[in-house]
Image (spheres, grey):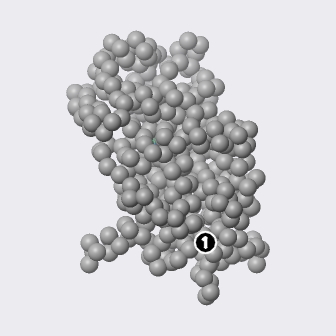
Amino acid sequence: MDGVFDVIVVGGGAIGATSAWRLAQTGRRVLLLDRGQLGSEASSAAAGMLGAQLEVSEPGAFYHLCLESRSLYQDFVDELLEATGVDAQLTHNGIFQLAYSEEEVRTLQTRMRWQLDAGANAEWLDAGTVAEQEPVVSPCLGALLLPDDSNVNALLLMRALSIAAHRFCSVVEGAQVTDIQPQPGGGYSVLTPTGHYVAQAVVVTAGAWAQALLRPFATPCTIRPVKGQLLAIRPRRGRGIRRTLFSEDVYLVPKRDGTIVVGATEERDAGFNRDVTIDALMTLLSSVHRMAPGLKDAVFERSWMGLRPGSPQGQPWIGEVDGAPGLHVAVGHFRNGILLSPITGLMVAHSVCHEPWPTRWQPFHVARVHRRNEVSLG
Ligand code: GLY
């Protein structure tokens, strides 16, 4: 055996590294295992949008979870800066959701109304105001401005989380977990090809790779990779964008280094394929050309891909698994792993420390969802 810990966290993306760091802050001895390098998968592929209002199409618990996590972000990145010296470049520049058809106008205005009713900030801007504020954009029918949605540099966030994890936890990279075995006296043995580790508690935060690890346990989790391809462009001087621009086809996220991240495909049948394809890049670039023709002379910088941990509703399962004391999950964050990292870290810490969850988090509890599904099947 290669080590005994209080908690082993399996998967070192933003969710896993945040959870490991929060658990270490409770005084526990934490081991963080990653099959590659910390953050080398979906987390550093992300465009870094913190679209709490953008990404949710109806009121409810998930909307509030997203808002709660967004509200934690400034303190989260400040604490990381203090602990690691790395600034994740949280930028409060808001998001424009652009409408190009009457149907999109109706959908966005409906969204604006329920979000205003729920107490959030949202504003409808007419076409002229959009053109004035973002001159590179093609004529549209108006835009929903979500001023409190923001963005972070996902690469820098991951660098900060990686430093924090290395400083406060034990970390083993290049350790692909092959099995999690319950021990006769309680706790779990976590197996990798190069060693095995034992802890009373295990937290599975393995992103798109979580499903295979959870198969032996009774969970409701069905996680499938959803491939996203992205690219970065550098606009000519004076032709940038101020806010994140989002349309049905494409989104553009301005970064502090002057580049714009363009995302993203959503490929549900690509499995674990890692190719960056001409087809996908052409689709994204044609969409940029249509939505923001003022960027047509921008310089292409690079392209990449990531595998989102897809879940049927796009919502995570978090907490201790039914019938498996000490086994916890934080999986299925789909498009919102970066946004939901701060709140998920808290939820995991509460779960492992057996501190009660507030009611508002309950709809995401893995055991509760499991029992609800069992009842409806029965
Ligand atoms: N968070 C946006 C995306 O997954 O494309």
Q: Quadrant of the N terminus?
A: bottom right
Foreground of the two, 358 or 351? 358
The image quarter containing residue 102 is: top left
The amino acid type found where label 1 is placed reads Ala
Residue 4 left/right relative to 67: right
In the depicted structure, whether residue 251 falls above or below residue 371: above
In this picture, is 106 found above or below 59?
above
Q: Is residue 359 above or below residue 235?
A: below
Task: Say few, some or many: other residues with alpha carbon within 10 Å of mark 1 (under 14 / 14 to 19 / 20 or more).
Answer: many
Q: Residue at x 73, y 48 (%)?
A: 163
Q: Is residue 246 visible?
A: yes
Give the residue drawn at x 65%, y 68%. Answer: 7
Q: Position of residue 288 (x, y in %)?
A: 45, 26
Residue sticking out furthest to the bottom: 184
Residue 35 at what x, y percent from top left? 66, 61
For the point 56% across and 19% down, which residue is it? Answer: 235
Badge 1 element: strand
Residue under circle 1? 201
Specify the quadrant of the image occupied by residue 119. Answer: top left
